[in-house]
Image (cartoon, rainbow, N blue to C red):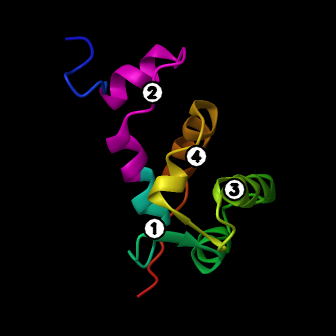
Amino acid sequence: GGVGAVGRISARAWYCGGGNGTPVDVDSLLSIFQQLDLNKDGFIDQAELDAILEKDDVNNEFGHWLRKTMNTLDLDRDSKVSFEEFRAINEEDVNKLSKSLLQVPPVDME
């Protein structure tokens, strides 16, 4: 067990461990990113956020938080978030996002 040669730990170990400065598992981040990247172009953009947030069961507080978080992650200010930018997300936000996405029905942008 423990940390692998690449320095990653499993998503389960990270979530159960509560963070403590441990890097967020890249596979977990990619999975969350792919749920938000509805058209699979490698970016999360405003149209995708709108589609996710237009669902009836998404509350306004989560919507406001999600837009603010994505805006913060958009380091080059091109109105879309790449996976490289997304990787800067903090542990607390990953937890909130993963829990919230479980409650949001899938959206199809095709």
Hey, what amino acid is under mark 1? Pro
Q: Is residue 2 above or below residue 79?
A: above
Mark 3–mark 2 Cα distance, whole angstroms, equals: 21 Å
Mark 1: few, some, or many residues within 10 Å (few <14, many ≥20)?
some
Q: Residue at x 55, y 59 (%)?
A: 104
* Residue interval drawn in magenta: 10-31
Residue 69: assigned label: none
Q: Residue at x 69, y 68 (%)?
A: 77
Instruction: Report the residue marked by disc 3.
Output: 66
Which callout, 3 or 2, points to the residue nearer the camera? 2
Q: Is residue 79 above or below residue 20?
A: below
Q: Is residue 11 above or below residue 73?
A: above
Q: Quadrant of residue 85?
A: bottom right
Instruction: Report the residue marked by disc 1.
Output: 106
Residue 23: assigned label: 2
Q: Secondary structure at mark 3?
A: helix
Q: Residue at x 63, y 39 (%)?
A: 93
Mark 2: few, some, or many residues within 10 Å (few <14, many ≥20)?
few
Image check: 33 left or right of 80?
Answer: left
Residue 97: assigned label: 4
Mark earlier in primary sequence (3, 1)? 3
